[in-house]
């Protein structure tokens, strides 16, 4: 497919239009290019163990982050499959599902429908965090020396040149990149470590810690869920809209409870979140989890998700809507 057509499709299909996917990807990749790549061990959905650190020094690596709900990802898959089929012995190609609003079954169905043959991995957030994942698709090319050579969003001449350079380069001494540890997901009942979060309005909010405070509801969201997924995932889009409306009504009546909306940084900037707040007249405080640290720490892979924290900073419940269960839980917490 011609690069110009791909660019037009990406612009039309992008969840947020404040800047193009290529601009977002290049901005995210700018501090990474030339740096040692993460030495993670991945496991494919078929159980294949892929040690990235063992590949460095022998092969170039082409990682493509994608999602089943992502329109430009689907448009680019023929190119990606061709890259895998023609990779030869000097390039290792991996399809990395972003692990956001996608289940294993949905990924398996997608692979089967498109006839994908390359290794498919579902990221737990560690690889995306290390490689500054901001959009889907996001291409990352790692040279044989273990250094990040290219980060982008489009299938264009720059990507093709990066792949050609990576596969033709001689074997080199390997750079020792960071080993990203697996996330320690906070389970129900856990005492949350104190974390400071700053809202769009500049207010500092403390999550967790031992100091007694009012109960807190963390509302994990994405500002494009309601709009972008309306056609491809209408049930999910409706759930996001319903959660927003329920939370807005409940927050107005539960004045003794603290509320904080935490937005994913995937396909979302501060400006996108501000537009979302204005468009829907959202009243609860909002913060952007630009690095994905909070989503990963709490093990949130789908939106909407609501986490209830008691006055002592313990994680009490995980819910996917602000319905009767949340009202009952808040009633119990505020009556103590």
Image: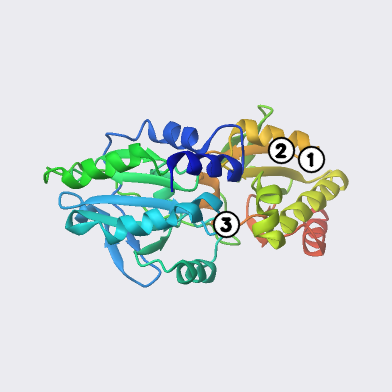
Please identify the residue farthest to the right as the structure is shown.
253
- Mark 1: secondary structure: helix
**Up-down: is 197 above or below 202?**
below
Q: Name the residue under label 1.
A: 280
Across and down, in percent, residue 17 comes to: 61, 36
Q: Name the residue under label 3.
A: 69
174 vs 210, left or right, is: left
105 vs 203, left or right, is: left
Out of 273 and 169, give the one closest to the viewer. Answer: 169
- Mark 2: secondary structure: helix
Quarter residue 35 falls in:
top left
Tag 2 or tag 3, which sits nearer the N-term? 3
Across and down, in percent, residue 7 comes to: 50, 39
Q: Mark 2 points at which residue?
A: 276
Q: Report if the CB atoms under discs 2 and 1 are less than 8 Å apart.
A: yes
Tag 1 or tag 3, which sits nearer the N-term? 3
- Give the residue displayed 45% in from the left and 52% down from the top: 76
141 vs 281, left or right, is: left
Out of 12 and 121, give the one closest to the viewer. Answer: 12
Q: Report if the CB atoms under discs 3 and 2 are less than 8 Å apart.
A: no
């Amino acid at each position: 497919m011609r690069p110009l057509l791909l660019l037009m499709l990406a612009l039309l299909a992008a969840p947020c239009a404040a800047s193009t996917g290529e601009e977002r990807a290049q901005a995210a990749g700018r501090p990474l290019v030339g740096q040692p790549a993460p030495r993670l061990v991945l496991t494919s959905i078929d159980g294949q163990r892929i040690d990235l650190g063992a590949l460095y020094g022998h092969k170039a690596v082409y990682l493509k982050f994608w999602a089943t709900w992502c329109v430009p990802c689907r448009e680019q898959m023929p190119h990606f499959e061709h890259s895998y089929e023609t990779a030869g012995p000097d390039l290792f190609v991996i399809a990395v599902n972003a692990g956001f609003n996608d289940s294993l079954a949905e990924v398996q169905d997608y692979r089967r429908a498109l006839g994908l043959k390359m290794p498919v991995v579902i990221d737990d957030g560690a690889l995306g965090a290390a490689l500054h994942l901001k959009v889907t698709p996001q291409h990352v090319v790692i040279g044989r020396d273990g250094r990040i050579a290219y980060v982008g969003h489009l299938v264009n001449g720059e990507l093709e040149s990066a792949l050609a350079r990576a596969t033709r380069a001689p074997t080199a001494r390997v750079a020792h990149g960071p080993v990203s540890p697996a996330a320690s997901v906070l389970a129900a009942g856990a005492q949350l470590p104190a974390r400071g979060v700053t809202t769009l309005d500049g207010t500092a909010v403390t999550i967790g810690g031992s100091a007694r405070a009012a109960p807190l509801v963390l509302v994990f969201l994405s500002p494009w869920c309601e709009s972008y997924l309306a056609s491809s995932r209408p049930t999910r889009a409706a759930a996001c809209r319903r959660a927003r409306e329920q939370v807005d009504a409940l927050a107005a009546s539960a004045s003794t409870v603290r509320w904080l909306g935490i937005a994913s940084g995937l396909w979302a900037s501060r400006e996108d979140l501000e537009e979302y707040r204005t468009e829907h007249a959202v009243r609860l405080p909002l913060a952007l989890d630009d690095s994905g640290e909070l989503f990963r720490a709490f093990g949130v892979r789908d939106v909407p998700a609501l986490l209830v924290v008691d006055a002592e900073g313990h994680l009490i419940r995980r819910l996917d809507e602000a319905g009767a269960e949340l009202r009952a839980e808040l009633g119990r917490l505020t009556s103590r």
